[in-house]
Image (cartoon, helix red, strand yellow):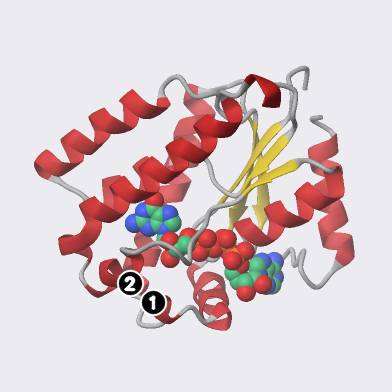
Amino acid sequence: MKQNPYIAVEGAIGAGKTTLSTMLAQRFDFTLMKEIVEENPFLDKFYQNIEEWAFQLEMFFLCNRYKQLGDTLLNPSHAYQPIVSDYHIYKNMIFAERTLSGVQLDKYRQIYHLLTDDLPKPNLIVYIKADLDTLLHRIQKRGRDFEQNFDAGYLSQLVEDYETAISHIRAQEPDTVIITIDGDKLDFVERPEDFEQIVAKIKEHL
Ligand SMILES: Nc1ncnc2c1ncn2[C@@H]1O[C@H](COP(=O)(O)OP(=O)(O)OP(=O)(O)O)[C@@H](O)[C@H]1O
Ligand SMILES: Nc1nc(=O)c2ncn([C@H]3C[C@H](O)[C@@H](CO)O3)c2[nH]1
């Protein structure tokens, strides 16, 4: 990779994005960009009534991510800083396409493009692909209150949406390296050799 490394770790809810990106940032000594979840005022309400709260929640995520990415990526003093992030900005569209519809989705799409089209995009995506059972198990194990009555149907759709989105990025951005990790088999938390396998794959592209 000739450019400065900018890695985004992606995958459906509970796939292990924050865990893996934190480990990678430490291992490569890259700057970590991590989403703040606990201070989100809409997540709890959203999981109780998706239709009612989706627009506020999606806009909140979009504005926060825009601010975080803009502050780092458009700041000249960060120009040569290698980065690993626990999200790709495109995840906003993955979720919004699932939770919004009609005029709200149209307006959201316009704002999304306005805010994000000129942001630098990751040149390497680590996609953790895991099946529904694995994700539900991890979400349960993590034990966040607002995710405990989780609708498995919603998650199952998101798993498919992620597959579609990754294929879309692969087709639209052939220069972006996409490394797919088998999140059902590789346990980078408990097995150091599994983490080393991921590190080795990334190194091939740095
Ligand atoms: N490969 C793995 N093997 C076993 N447990 C894992 C693995 N990856 C993550 N976990 C555990 O699963 C839970 C979810 O991980 P994490 O919070 O990193 O997921 P995430 O993708 O960032 O979630 P979210 O989409 O909600 O932001 C955590 O308890 C973590 O310790
Ligand atoms: N609707 C919606 N849109 C997003 O852009 C988005 N990004 C993350 N999440 C949810 C997943 C976890 O429960 C929790 C932490 O990642 O927040 C989202 N939900």
Res. 99 in view: no
Residue 74 locus on image (x, y percent):
56, 23
Q: Secondary structure at mark 1?
A: helix
Pointer 1 local density, CA inside 10 Å: few below 14, some 14–19, many at least 20: few
Query: Looking at this view, is 119 or 90 the one in front?
Result: 119
Q: Which residue is mark 1?
A: 146
Counting the numbered discs, the total is 2
Q: Is residue 192 above or below residue 76?
A: below
| Image location (x, y in percent) of residue 88 | 52, 40
Q: Nearer the viewer, residue 149 or 79?
A: 79
Q: Residue at x 16, y 47 (%)?
A: 101
Tell me if the residue at label 1 has its CB under 8 Å from ligand 2: yes
Left or right: residue 148 compared with residue 70: left
Q: Do the numbered discs 1 and 2 sit on residues whose CB atoms are within 8 Å?
A: yes
Which residue, given by chain and number where applicable, does mark 2 sit on? 44
Q: Answer with mark 1 or mark 2, whichever residue precedes in sequence.
A: 2
Amino acid under disc 2: Asp
Q: Residue at x 74, y 63 (%)?
A: 186
Q: Quadrant of the N terminus?
A: top right
User: For residue 78, which numbered disc appears in the image?
Assistant: none
- Residue 163 percent coordinates (x, y): 47, 47
Q: Hey, which quadrant is residue 124 in on the image?
A: top right
Q: Amino acid at mark 1?
A: Phe
In space, the residues marked 1 and 2 are separated at their CA atoms by 5 Å
Q: Residues within 10 Å of mark 2 (few under 14, many from 20)?
A: some
Percent x, y of residue 54: 23, 56
Q: Quadrant of residue 178?
A: top right
Give the structural element (helix, strand or loop) at label 2: helix
Q: Is residue 89 left or right of residue 190?
A: left
Q: Residue at x 38, y 49 (%)?
A: 61
